[in-house]
Amino acid sequence: MNNFIYDIPTKVYFGKGMIEGNLGNELKKYGKNVLLTYGGGSIKKSGLYDRVKSEIESAGLKMFELSGIEPNPRIESVRAGVKICKEEHIDVVLAVGGGSTLDCSKWICAGAKVDFDPWDFFSEKWADLNGALPLITVLTLSATGSEMDAGGVITNLSTNEKQGRIHHDLYPKVSFLDPTITYSVGKFQTAAGSADIFNHIIETYFTREDGMYMLDAFMEGLMRTVVKYAPVAIKEPENYEARANLMWTSSWAINGFIGMDKRKAWSCHPLEHELSAFYDITHGLGLAIITPRWLRYCLNKDTLYKYVTYGVNVFGIDPSLPPERIADLAIEKTSEFLTKTLGLPGSLSEIGIGEENFKIMAKKACEGDVIDGFVPLRADDIVKIYKMCE
Amino acid sequence: MNNFIYDIPTKVYFGKGMIEGNLGNELKKYGKNVLLTYGGGSIKKSGLYDRVKSEIESAGLKMFELSGIEPNPRIESVRAGVKICKEEHIDVVLAVGGGSTLDCSKWICAGAKVDFDPWDFFSEKWADLNGALPLITVLTLSATGSEMDAGGVITNLSTNEKQGRIHHDLYPKVSFLDPTITYSVGKFQTAAGSADIFNHIIETYFTREDGMYMLDAFMEGLMRTVVKYAPVAIKEPENYEARANLMWTSSWAINGFIGMDKRKAWSCHPLEHELSAFYDITHGLGLAIITPRWLRYCLNKDTLYKYVTYGVNVFGIDPSLPPERIADLAIEKTSEFLTKTLGLPGSLSEIGIGEENFKIMAKKACEGDVIDGFVPLRADDIVKIYKMCE
């Protein structure tokens, strides 16, 4: 069991109507000039834009805007945000959206504090990260957990690269989680978001390190929560109980708590990041396709025990069955949940992706070496997993 | 489901040897004058005193001391600590001990910031709490969760009163949780501490409010953790896995996370506080005696469903049994765990407590009115529960 430092500073307002009377007060603690960041126009249609604007105005703050942040947010949006922050002396960034808007805003906050191009954070300038503007978020989609974690992923389409890093300065100061805001999230995004949450827990749970039982038990509970409530949210979009459980689970799946005593790398995420960097697909959809194949590929006599506790404690498989049978069933149930139950495409061919880039993507995913995760994966392993996804 | 604000600011260094190289750095962020608080001499015998002192000295800080803080810490110790803080211009308090030392130190930190007697925090002066000195803790006993919560309980023997309150300013800034420090905790204290942890979860879990499934699942995992590891720690005091799981569970059982969406009062704690206020018994022991009787008393057709999920998910009772049978078995297993398995006395008579004060204790426990918890308890209900404990 590894030592760790627990230090999650994000304050969360959770529940219906918590924005009103609280958002303005939190923003004005940090200054006068607010940069509001968001994606497409959906927050205008839903009325959320007006609610947020009204809070900013009531608090007597000055609002600037950056809209149009893309799914798989691009470095160009980060640059545009940094420019506004510098020119307008922004004191605090308010990100209203899902993981893409939040991730992009994190790097805007960091980019505003340095004089080099923010893409350089992902290479030689990492050590020069110099704090970040305070970030406050209003979450509109339960998925990435960006609302309570310290990481963000950015795409550079000019180089087909998708890069992410984690730094304590990138934790949002405050996040507003109102489950009713996610009522308008459609079936596909609800499904893909749930697959994302589920995979974050899988990536942490499947390890061969000695971890803490109490954390494994928490992870099993989080996975059962997704299995229980994702189908409900898809069927009944305005089910508060389902939306609330998914929302709080999305935060705790990745805020660091469940994996602080672990050191091993994640595996499905680097494989998926290449898919969405090359084909701009929805991240959660890519994970839904990869996860069960990766589980199948990593199953062997040394890893079997982990599949057994997973199958029994997450899917309620009969513990008296032979371990190999439990593992098989667990993988089948994972696949069934992520595709049939969530209603997501189950293979790369279904979304029009062929094997043309498997080798180059595999090499990039392991950075030419190895992903040192649950089972070490080299480029030829990764190609095999991509082929299983065809 | 109630709205809530999640805001737990405590930073935790978890693991073997984390004090060295970190404690001094954390202390000196807050100033130069450190008040070290502790209980009896056990930290001198174990070498912990020297480890802590060495960190303070290496950081170039000036150390003052308050020792002799009692189990069920008394208001006189708070007053003594406040006096030192004021006279010596203390910048930061370092509490080294279990829940008693930590609770006492919290009120020292608050008392140092006001000019009235700290006992008045528990009555007319509560609203005048005016911040608190920063508190850093080194935990020596897994039990109360005081290392990561915002509450503290103080005893006034002159009035037979035990009072506790919660305030955000009372969260420790930093806590050091090194499971190896608890290797020297004896069987009785390990058992009583585990009963305390277990009861904190019970108090939150048994509610008739609609809570979040993901939190219930976490609570069930925490309870299973205590059931699994408390007997191991009692049998093998130097089992790192057991001590680590109990330690991190103690923090999460009461830091607020599991119960933020709940509003109902706790029940066993006020009943126990009267016992230890009148008889100065170990808090966890009192809880071990009260908990199964309280569960029995609260069982009725409206509350039955909660006993069923508890029995099935914590003790693995066969879900196909009739609900009433599951509830009975769950209470029996709770009683068996808290007494036989933990090796604690199972009744008030075994520890020499008779019925002479039941009525006055009951009246005090409900403050002359009602404890509005899982099942509302008035004085006559409480007397009945005390009698069940005889």
Image (spheres, coloured by chain):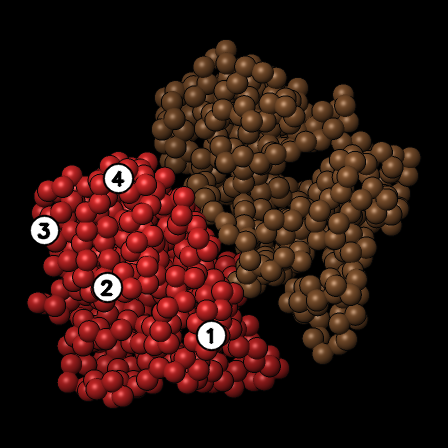
Chain colours: A brown, B red
The residue that label 1 is drawn on is B236
Q: Chain of mark 2?
A: B
Where is residue A21, by image quadrant? Answer: top left
Q: Is residue B113 left or right of residue A249?
A: left
The residue that label 2 is drawn on is B41
Q: Is residue B359 left or right of residue A348?
A: left
Q: Residues within 10 Å of mark 3 (few under 14, many from 20)?
A: some
Determine the CA span between mark 2 and mark 4.
22 Å
In this rendering, the label closer to the viewer, 4 or 3 = 4
Q: Residue at x 11, y 48 (%)?
A: B83
Can residue B181 be seen in this snapshot?
yes
* Amino acid at pointer 1: Glu
Q: Earlier in the sequence, mark 1 or mark 3?
A: 3
On the image, the x and y values in percent for residue A388 come to: 87, 50
Query: Considering the numbered disc 3 on the image, is that residue within a helix, a strand or a loop?
Result: loop
Is label 2 on the same chain as label 4?
yes
Q: Are marks 1 and 4 in contact (CB under 8 Å)?
A: no
The residue that label 4 is drawn on is B61
Query: Considering the numbered disc 4 on the image, is that residue within a helix, a strand or a loop?
Result: loop
